[in-house]
């Protein structure tokens, strides 16, 4: 029973760590050609394409509310999104693994749209598509046709990452020696279970691992509060720099706790199963 509990606990933390977050930033209009409600609707259609295509076990699409929570307020979110010079940097500010955004412009008499998808951590452009139309409905049709192909690149990226496999050793079946007819011999002793030493070592590793995972979870909550604080610091660059350094420090601590906790939990489970 103890082994099953720790295995389930380890798998739960592993699943949390494997899910990758995708932020769909509000569509921007460089020339105020369309209304805010139309921009919001285009953004929702891009987000809908990602939700419908990507498996929820591997990807989590962030809501507008969660993005606003990281950036401080609706007004500050609009300001930051409009002034951001790098979409990948904006993705890191909202703690996303991938970030996508559409931008509206004009070419002659036609409306244009460009949708880009970035790896927020590496800063690499993973894909994009562009198009133009005489009206907003043509841009909507373009999103419906091509947004799914854009997010398919994330599935191709995930195929190159091997899924972790947890192997459980099969219990050995004790062999019983045949009993000679003239002089029956006593049955050989059945192999005893884990020694007390290995039991306490495994339990200690599991306890330390669970504690580190809890510490990582608390750091994750602290990280979200730091992101909110970062968005409320105003426009003073020195405040931005100091707060961002704090955010990066907390994020590093969180990752260390999760990684170390996973190692201790896996080691404890391995010792329990091996011995």
Image (tube, grey):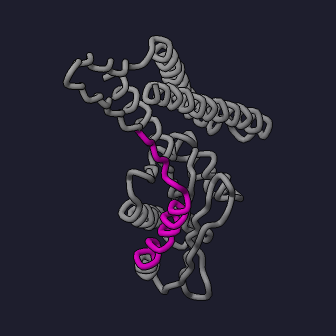
- Asked if residue 147 lies in the magenta stretch, the reply is yes
Q: Nearer the viewer, residue 118 or 81?
A: 118
The percent position of residue 245, horizontal first and vertical second, equals 74, 35
Percent x, y for residue 78?
57, 52
- Position of residue 256 measured from the top left corner of the image (x, y, whole percent): 63, 32
Q: Which residues are magenta?
A: 143-168
Res. 32 in view: no
The quarter holding residue 237 reads top right
- Does any portion of residue 152 appear in the rendered image? yes
Q: Residue at point 46% right, 25% down?
A: 275
Is residue 178 found inside the magenta-colored segment of the image? no
Q: Residue at x 32, y 29 (%)?
A: 174
Viewer-nearest residue: 146 or 114: 146
Q: Mostly what secondary structure, the magenta segment? A: helix
Note whether 261 is above or below 53 in the view shown: above
Residue in the picture at 28% in, 28% down: 176
| Residue 4 left/right relative to 197 | left
Q: Nearer the viewer, residue 39 or 197?
A: 197
Above or below — where is 79 with respect to 167? below
Q: In this rendered view, identify the residue nearer to me: 203 or 275.
A: 275
């Amino acid at each position: 029973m103890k082994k099953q509990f720790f295995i389930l606990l380890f798998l739960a933390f592993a699943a949390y760590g494997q899910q990758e977050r995708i932020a769909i930033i509000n569509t921007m209009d460089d020339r105020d050609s369309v209304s805010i409600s139309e921009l919001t609707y285009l953004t929702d259609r891009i987000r809908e394409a990602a939700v419908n295509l990507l498996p929820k076990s591997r990807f989590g699409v962030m809501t507008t509310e969660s993005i606003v929570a990281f950036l401080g307020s609706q007004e500050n979110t609009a300001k930051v999104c409009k002034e951001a010079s790098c979409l990948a940097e904006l993705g890191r500010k909202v703690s996303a693994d991938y970030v996508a955004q559409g931008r509206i412009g004009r070419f002659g008499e036609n409306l244009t749209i460009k949708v880009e998808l970035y790896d927020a951590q590496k800063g690499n452009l993973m894909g994009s598509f562009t198009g133009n139309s005489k009206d907003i409905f043509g841009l909507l049709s373009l999103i419906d046709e091509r947004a799914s192909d854009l997010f398919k690149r994330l599935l191709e990226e995930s195929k190159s990452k091997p899924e972790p496999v947890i192997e459980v050793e099969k219990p050995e079946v004790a062999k019983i020696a045949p009993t000679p007819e003239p002089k029956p011999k006593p049955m050989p002793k059945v192999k005893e279970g884990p020694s007390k030493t290995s039991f306490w070592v495994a339990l200690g590793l599991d306890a330390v691992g669970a504690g580190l995972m809890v510490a990582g979870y608390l750091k994750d909550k602290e990280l979200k509060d730091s992101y909110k604080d970062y968005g409320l610091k105003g426009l003073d660059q020195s405040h931005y720099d100091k707060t961002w350094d704090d955010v990066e420090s907390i994020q590093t601590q969180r990752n260390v706790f999760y990684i170390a906790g996973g190692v201790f939990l896996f080691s404890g489970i391995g010792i329990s199963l091996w011995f």
